[in-house]
Amino acid sequence: MKEFKIAILGGGNIGTSLAKGLVASLQYTRDEILITEKREPRISHLKKLGFEVTDDNHSAVTSARMIIMSVKPQQFLSLAEEIKDNITPEHMILSTITGVALRDIGSLLGNVPVVRIMPNIALEICESMTCVSFMNTTDLQEKMILTLFNKMGEALVIPEDLMGAATVAGACGIAFALRFMRAMSQGGIEIGFDSEMSLRIAARTVKGAAGLIIETCNHPEMEIDKVTTPQGITISGLNEMEHQGLSSAVIRGLITSFNKLGNLAGSSH
Ligand SMILES: NC(=O)c1ccc[n+]([C@@H]2O[C@H](COP(=O)([O-])OP(=O)(O)OC[C@H]3O[C@@H](n4cnc5c(N)ncnc54)[C@H](OP(=O)(O)O)[C@@H]3O)[C@@H](O)[C@H]2O)c1
């Protein structure tokens, strides 16, 4: 049987982004990654991307030591049941699955090293914020996982009880930021740009703003102060956005997502 370095169980949105990121970060080649999927259209899609794909989770687990579970929360139990007899002490289990606790994974799959990861879809361009929590791992394994995800963006170790908050801030957060960008580009069209130009300007501007905060570690208001001259045009626009509830809408959106997460059946955040 062919050996793989990593098996990703569930090649949906995040499983595919992860596989692409592992290749884009030059850490693995496509033929070192095995992805499992059950439905033919998904299998052929992933094969077209050049990945090795199977519908057999048993052989996938037997052929790799690092196993990444990346199915929907309601699919976790059946996947765990499917693979539990193939897990050995040599395995390390990673999970992207929202709301499934380390102890639940460990109690179903044995006393193996388990890592919860909460990345976002920017993994595929190696720009993901990935929050990480460990159980049963050695220092060496933790270092290896942090290196792996630092090469696909930035990895941050968090207490497991913040995983729900990490889901909202980081994984959902990318959608919140994208919606803001869409609004910027819609506004740009109204003041004269065609949609392509407008989106390009919005994307580069948001990227620049993010880069400024990441590079300088300054508070956003400190950078905003540099743009807002008294009685100027920027402060007028900003204040109008606040009158319309921009900050409040974003904060309430995060809290709504977080509360919904808490209501998911069986969720332990
Ligand atoms: N999307 C994100 O940005 C993101 C970010 C961080 C974390 N997450 C979490 O990561 C998990 C996956 O999210 P996702 O968005 O990638 O979901 P998704 O697109 O639905 O991907 C899951 C894939 O796994 C397949 N699958 C289900 N059971 C399987 C099995 N037993 N063996 C092999 N494949 C199986 C599913 O097939 P079917 O469609 O046929 O069921 C689906 O294609 C979720 O728990 C989510 O909360 C997602």
Image: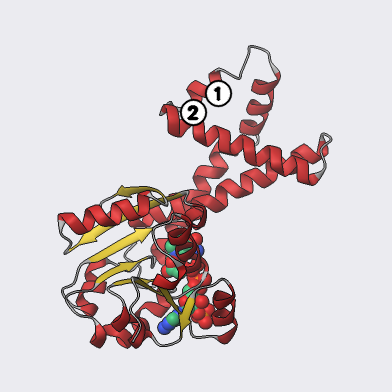
Q: For the C terminus, which image quadrant? A: bottom left
* Residue 70 appears in the rendering: no
Image quadrant where residue 268 sits: bottom left
**Crowd rating for badge 2 (residues with CA inside 10 Å; few <14, some 14–19, many 20+):** few
Residue for badge 1? 224
Which residue is the extreme one toward the top? Answer: 230
Residue 24 seen in this snapshot: yes
Q: Secondary structure at mark 2?
A: helix
Amino acid type assigned to the residue bearing label 1 in the image: Ile
Labels 2 and 1 touching (C-beta < 8 A): yes
Element marked by disc 1: helix
The residue under the point 35% across, 49% down is 155
Vertical placement of residue 240 versus 80, above or below = above
The residue labelled by disc 2 is: 220
Q: Residue at x 49, y 85 (%)?
A: 38
Q: Which mark is residue 34?
A: none
Mark 1 neighbour density, 10 Å: few (under 14) some (14–19) many (20 or more) = some
Q: Amino acid at mark 2?
A: Pro
Image-based side of 194 in relation to 60, left or right: right
Residue 31 in which image quadrant: bottom left
Q: Position of residue 129 (x, y in %)?
A: 42, 49
* Ligand 1 neighbours mark 2 (CB distance < 8 Å): no
Query: Which quadrant holds the N terminus?
Result: bottom left
Residue in front for this viewpoint, 238 or 60: 60
Give the camera-side residue of 237 and 184.
184
